[in-house]
């Protein structure tokens, strides 16, 4: 073997090494970018979601609940007021009330319990008055936000008070 052919072989090996290294670095860079995006996107969504929730919550001013006027006395209808859960209660005496179903303590969804005559938050035992939404016992610091209710032949219209 001549020195020229040895030189050619080592030159080819160097070119192959450089190419392999470039491919490896490109693949590692792409994997690193994908990993960073996979980590950053949930963080972005977590940080952005309260703002989006606030914007969409303020954009909604009323909800029409079709056929909800047929709701039996003594029962409840859960619905969405924008992005948030809400309660429409038709009391035994024929009165209607509606509240946000978001607990004022840490934001769990509350439930109406007609047999107990209360709105209850199962997360930490918060209790609200089902007629006024007032916080009665447990950790909730404020009453539930009340909505205005208008019963029509087509349904029940719930709007910001
Ligand atoms: S979140 Fe409702 S009582 Fe704590």
Image (cartoon, rainbow, N blue to C red):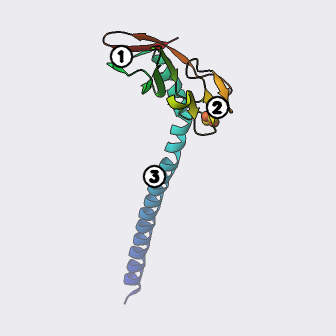
- Residue 34 has which mark? 3
Q: Please tell me which residue lies in front, 120 or 82.
A: 120
Give percent across and percent down for residue 71.
37, 21
Per the image, the residue denoted by label 1 is: 69
- Can I make out residue 113 in this image? no
The residue sitting at 52% across, 49% down in the picture is 39
Per the image, the residue denoted by label 2 is: 105
Mark 2 CB lies closer than 8 A to ligand 1: yes
Q: Earlier in the sequence, mark 2 or mark 1?
A: 1
Which secondary structure, mark 1? helix
Q: Earlier in the sequence, mark 2 or mark 3?
A: 3
Pointers 3 and 1 in contact (C-beta within 8 Å): no
Which secondary structure, mark 2? loop
Q: Please tell me which residue lies in front, 96 or 28.
A: 96
- Residue 91 has which mark? none
Q: Residues within 10 Å of mark 2 (few under 14, many from 20)?
A: some
The residue sitting at 36% across, 19% down in the picture is 68
Number of the front mark, 3 or 1: 1
């Amino acid at each position: 073997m001549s020195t020229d052919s040895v030189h050619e072989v080592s030159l080819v090996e160097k070119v192959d090494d450089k190419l392999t290294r470039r491919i490896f670095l490109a693949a590692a860079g792409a994997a690193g970018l994908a990993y960073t995006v996979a980590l950053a996107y949930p963080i972005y969504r977590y940080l952005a979601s309260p703002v989006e929730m606030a914007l969409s919550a303020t954009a909604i001013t009323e909800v029409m609940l079709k056929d909800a006027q047929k709701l039996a006395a003594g029962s409840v209808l859960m619905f969405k007021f924008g992005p948030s859960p809400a309660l429409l209660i038709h009391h035994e005496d024929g009165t209607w009330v509606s509240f946000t179903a978001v607990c004022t303590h840490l934001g769990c969804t509350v439930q109406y319990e007609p047999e107990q005559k209360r709105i209850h938050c199962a997360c930490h035992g918060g209790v609200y008055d089902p007629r006024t939404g007032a916080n009665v016992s447990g950790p909730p610091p404020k009453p539930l936000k009340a909505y205005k209710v208008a019963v029509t032949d087509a349904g029940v219209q719930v709007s910001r008070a």
